[in-house]
């Protein structure tokens, strides 16, 4: 997700009262690790599963819950997904899709508004061929997805850590935002995984369990396309050769429809445009309905495409899937520290959360008219103490001042609110709009008030 996003912090599910209880209030939730039955990373083996981190996954279908969620005020943020790109001019047209994360009644939800379909690949039309529409996510509608624990499956335990991959496809993203010659080291997917996903999915404690590693990026084994420089990552995609690694639990044959390589996506991934093998009676899809394609970091048969794992579980080393296709799934991979403790995937989830409820800032601002002598102003500039023109009461947090409009010879000091009138200003009455901001603190929200001050030069 090329979210401009506002960087989502690790807001894991918060145990709070109904949001409606706090009308006029705002809150922040500082998430801690969920506490369930734990196991040591050092005893994990290939095929085991455990929970760690959170991500939006299941679609909310309860109509009464949707109604309550829809009444929560929130600021929507653009995903920043690219629809068309002019590389020579460095201009981009973006898809009109927005999101917001909200907390309600002890759970966190992602609100997604599909105002425009996401194209199947950058440069195609957003009005046709949309996988979102095929998956039942219709343009003009808004959907909600619950943040849930991510289940990871163990690929292998080695001397330096435990290598794991998400059991399900968590999102649908292109290998690169635009069709271009690119390698894993410079693609947008790598950046998204190590920034957007890493920062939003894991708490600070969980990040401490994730090892940063440097790995080589192999050539395409059949066509010899260069895989690029070595990279150092927290999160990455499997390589082609790793998907045929018997030690990871996979078949050694690339053409095998290996059940261990087959994967299904979450509801959220489908809402982002993930291709899903349809149940339409076509023999080509029979037996694999609901499965999806997922990314590898190894290039395909051209410098513009990548290798992938198909929906049947076969590994393709000659994929004609261009880097800019948006309908391929993301199954993040990382190395877990051997000293870590993790929650078993079948254990109940209980959150320990610190919630801070903030009250509305009681800032009050009133203005007073003031007069200054023209004869004095002819000789030098004059300063007016803030208290002579502004009455500021009950401000919580640091107070700052800024001029919104007025004569250019009248200025306002940001820190003190002192007004300075430069010499030479002619006689008359001048109106000055001043914005007063109280930054708030741990108990109160920020607040701004804009007032009009009259300064008479006579």
Image (cartoon, grey):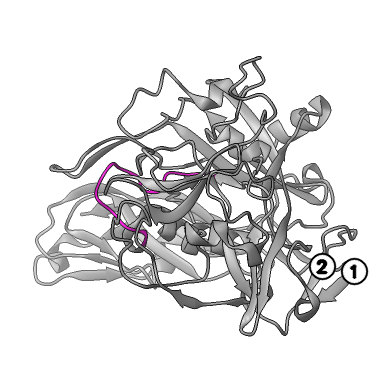
Callouts 2 and 1 close, C-beta under 8 Å: yes
Task: Report helix, strand or loop for mark 1.
Answer: loop
Q: For residue 250, what is the image quadrant?
A: bottom right
Residue at 58% from the left image edge and 23% from the top image edge: 284
Residue at 68% from the left image edge and 60% from the top image edge: 249
In this rendering, does residue 200 appear at all? yes
Q: Does the magenta stretch include residue 447?
A: no
Residue tagged 2 = 343
Q: Position of residue 299 (x, y in %)?
A: 36, 53
Q: For residue 143, what is the image quadrant?
A: top right
Whether residue 115 is situated above or below residue 449 in the rendered picture: above
* Nearest the eye: 314 or 81: 314
Determine which of the numbered discs, if any, sits on residue 37 in the image: 1
Q: What stretch is highlighted in magenta?
A: 172-184
Determine which of the numbered discs, if any, sits on residue 238 in the image: none
Q: Position of residue 412 (x, y in %)?
A: 30, 64
Q: Where is residue 387 in the image (x, y as percent from the top left)?
A: 44, 67
Whether residue 137 is situated above or below residue 351 in the rendered picture: above
Residue at 82% from the left image edge and 55% from the top image edge: 16
């Amino acid at each position: 997700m090329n979210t401009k996003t506002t960087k989502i912090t690790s807001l894991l599910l918060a145990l709070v009262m109904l949001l409606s209880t706090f009308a006029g209030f705002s809150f922040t939730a500082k998430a801690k690790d969920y506490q369930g039955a734990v196991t040591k990373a050092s005893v994990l083996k290939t095929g085991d599963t455990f929970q760690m981190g959170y991500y939006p996954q299941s679609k909310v279908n309860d109509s009464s819950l949707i109604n309550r969620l829809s009444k929560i005020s929130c600021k929507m943020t653009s995903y920043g997904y690219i629809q068309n790109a002019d590389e020579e001019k460095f201009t981009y047209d973006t898809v009109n899709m927005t999101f917001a994360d909200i907390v309600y009644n002890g759970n966190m939800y992602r609100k997604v508004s599909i105002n425009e379909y996401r194209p199947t690949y950058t440069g195609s039309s957003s009005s046709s061929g949309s996988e979102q529409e095929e998956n039942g996510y219709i343009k003009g509608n808004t959907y909600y997805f619950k943040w849930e624990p991510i289940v990871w499956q163990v690929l292998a335990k080695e001397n330096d850590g435990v290598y794991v991959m998400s059991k399900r496809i968590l999102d649908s993203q292109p290998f690169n935002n635009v069709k271009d010659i690119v390698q894993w080291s410079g693609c947008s997917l790598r950046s998204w995984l190590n920034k957007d996903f890493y920062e939003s999915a894991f708490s600070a404690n969980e990040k401490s369990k994730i090892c940063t590693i440097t790995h080589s990026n192999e050539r395409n084994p059949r066509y010899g396309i260069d895989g690029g420089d070595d990279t150092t990552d927290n999160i990455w995609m499997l390589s082609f050769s790793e998907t045929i690694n018997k030690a990871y639990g996979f078949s050694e044959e690339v053409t095998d429809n290996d059940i261990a390589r087959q994967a299904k996506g979450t509801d959220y991934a489908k809402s982002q445009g993930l291709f899903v093998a349809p149940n339409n009676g076509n023999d080509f899809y029979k037996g694999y309905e609901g499965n999806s394609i997922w990314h590898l970091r190894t290039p395909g048969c051209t410098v513009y495409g990548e290798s992938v794992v198909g929906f049947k579980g076969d590994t393709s080393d000659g994929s004609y899937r261009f880097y800019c296709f948006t309908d391929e799934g993301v199954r993040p991979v990382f190395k877990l520290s051997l000293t870590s403790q993790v929650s078993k995937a079948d254990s109940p989830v209980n959150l320990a959360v610190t919630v801070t409820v903030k009250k509305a800032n009681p800032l009050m601002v009133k203005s007073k008219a003031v007069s200054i002598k023209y004869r004095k102003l002819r000789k030098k500039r004059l300063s007016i103490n803030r208290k002579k023109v502004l009455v500021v009461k009950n401000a919580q947090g640091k107070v700052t001042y800024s001029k919104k409009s007025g004569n250019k010879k009248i200025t306002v000091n940001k820190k003190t609110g002192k007004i300075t009138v430069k010499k030479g200003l002619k006689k008359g009455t001048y109106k000055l709009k001043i914005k007063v901001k109280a930054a708030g603190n741990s108990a109160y929200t920020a607040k701004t008030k804009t007032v009009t001050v009259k300064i008479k030069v006579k």
